[in-house]
Amino acid sequence: METRLNLDPALIREARALAAKAGEPIVAMAKSHTTVSVERAVLRLAGLQGADDDGMPWVNRLVDAVRETTGLEHGVALPAWDALLAGGYDNLASLAAAAAQGKVAFRIPAGADAAVARAAASAALATGIGRIDANRQERQRMIEQTSQPRMPWIYLIVATGDIYEDIPQAQAAAREGADIIAVIRSTGQSLLDYVPEGATREGFAGTYATQENFRLMRAALDETSRELGRYVRLTNYASGLCMPEIASLAGLERLDMMLNDCMYGIIFRDINPRRTFIDQRFSRQIHARAGIIINTGEDNYLTTADAVDAAHTVVVSQLMNEFFGKEAGLADSQLGLGHAFEINPQVPDSFLLELAHAQLVRELFPDAPLKYMPPTKHMTGNVFAGYLLDAFFNLCGMMTSQSILLIGMMTEGIHTPFLSDRDLALENVRYVRDAAGRLGESFVPAPGGLIEQRAKQVLGESLALLRRINDEGLLTAIAEGTFGITKRPADGGRGLEGVVSRADDYFNPASEILEGGERAPAGGLDPRTAPVEAGAAR
Amino acid sequence: MTGNIVRPYGDTTGDGRIQVSFTLPVPYGTPAEKARAEGAAMQLAGKMGLEPAMVVHGKGMGPDYTFFIVYGRVSHLVDLSQVTVTEREFPLLNSAEVNLRIRSGLGRKLVVVGACIGTDAHTVGIDAILNVKGHSGEKGLEYYREIRVVNLGSQVAVPDLVARSAAEGADAVLVSQVVTQRDAHITNAKEMSAAFRAAEPYSRGPLLVLGGPRFDPSMTAELGVDKIFGKGTTPGEVASYLAYALAPDSAGASAETEQHVGASA
């Protein structure tokens, strides 16, 4: 994309280089450690499902048992498959059941025994990752059979707590025009150190992410996609203590997009920074393989910090997310970097500032399917003013060619949207798209004008912050409250006890395939499709 | 008019005109369906006291629902002398006001230690109040600049909680109890308050705040705590209470608080 803001390409290159330099020590740390959740993800990818009578998944039982005997520094795979073969168990589930009763003597095999165990583990993981590859192809087939919706994709949320209530709501939302359905998780699932099992009908302000819930919803949306002749994407949340496992389940059940931010859990959920970065790398390797688009959470910073003062922290976080994402194998077309329309509407020129921020992000990441979030912080309860603000958000999204638009609700912060709130919100976005969908091609800010100056200022502040982060290290910057004005020390937060330093003979058959194998072809996604034709029916 | 009796104001005193919008589960497709749907909306408007009423907008949403906007004259009167205001012993403040009140009234950061005690592993409540993430559109206590939060998580033993609270210099201790089997929440709460009262004279100990969906907010004396929050409590209510209870009001910091009731921070 040509620059309409007259940005200096040298500055952009420098920003990327600084982000890479800040991220490299984190990547080295992630490569030299594993976590209980990464190891559980290996077992899930090998097909281990189910839970004991208390509802504790077998993957947790097996990883805990291995950790208590051989430790996890060698990875779970070698001792697990060694015991599986030596003990003559039918499958991993029966091994896990025996291990939970303390009946399995795990060991780190050597020589020929080790080779046999490795081969068996690798074969099991090849099958599991083969299923992810097949799902990626199936998605492509589905898109060819139905159609690829035009961008911006309209993103709508359902969250009843009951998967069987979510399904008809999601199908109705798709019929009303949603291109993407996100099922919000139950509050606090990110802090559970296990993934619940089975179809669930009770949640706190959301529905649990489980493998069965994923499967049920994807199957329902496949049915609706065929009915509508338009592929409806499904989104969930690969975040929290079980990030790698949920990413794996998403790959296994053909979810299409996953919320997956490099720092969200640290800042907003007080999850340990090391745990987060290690889990994040593995989960992004899975997403890369699965053709899943990640959505990052920079919009959240602006719900705690001021959207003008903290605009550069959004850009810095996006650059970090881009670096970590690409290092893990994600393509540009899989980087749904997040940002938001959260400037106080009483600030003079607030819309110009929003345009500057949105256009800056568009130009910094020309090939990324950017996720643009509607106003939430300055929705006051005046639903009429809120509806106007949402229209301006939609207009800004069109003018700056954003890729994924979360639908703004005029009743934000009041209640779960009414049917009529959702319908009015869709009417709003349809009007703006039909009336001004082509405005992006003509939107060229005046050279030297306020929009250009503001964009350059934010880029300059981003560079200054990146330099500071390089001086002190990213973990220190996070500890000092650089992002979302929340301080998170590197050794604080939840989940640090689940971090393990890898031994020299650490073996992870999933990582070997993910890091070594050839990749499936990219999804052929153009994040900036031509402006939507005026009056086009969906 | 006595001055105590008022009606809604449209554009003339006493005209009683209002606007409402609602959805009915009726179709709005064929002309016959539209006529029936608008009749249904008029019937509801009439039962709501709108007479005369006018359906100014009807729109089908999918095959089964219709959205209406209705204007009308409401026949009801409002008697201002009969208005009752539920008294809350503390004013509801927004986050800036809470921070200001702590700064001016306490002169330092307010320290909050939070935990789930006993065998209760349900941190969903305490996390919803403490985590930045918060809930119901309100940020948690961590978001408040003038509040320092120490979240000890779940299954914290009472002696550990007492010791840690002293070490952190806690101004307030927030304890969440979700599990109620054999009244464990009651037993645990009493044990907790007794331990704090034994460790420090009442006047010097931290403010003890209990939260959980099954607590009766009127049981503070019985459980030996200063405040109990029940189901549906938001972080802003807790923050407002802490500021009210721990930071003396100075210079009318709460003078204009009522207009912020209901607004999220």
Image (cartoon, coloured by chain):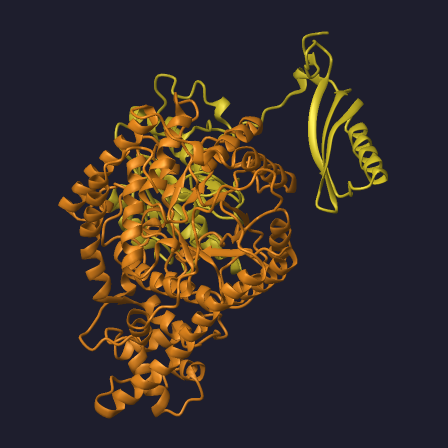
* Screen quadrant of the C terminus of chain B: top left
Image position, residue A381 (x, y; %): 54, 30
Residue A375 in sight: no
Among the 4 quarters of the image, the one containing residue B243: top left
Among the 4 quarters of the image, the one containing residue A108: bottom left
Residues B28 and B116: in front is: B28
* Screen quadrant of the N terminus of chain B: top right
Position of B191 relative to B144 (above/below): below
Numbered marks: total: 0
Q: Which residue is rendered at x = 23% and y = 47% of the image? A: A16
Residue B250 in sight: yes
Q: Is residue A356 left or right of residue A386?
A: left
Image position, residue B94 (x, y; %): 42, 29
Q: The yellow chain is which one?
A: B
Residues A89 and B53: in front is: B53
Q: Which residue is rendered at x = 46% and y = 54% of the image? A: B187
Q: The orange chain is which one?
A: A
Q: In this view, does B49 lie to the left or right of A491?
A: right
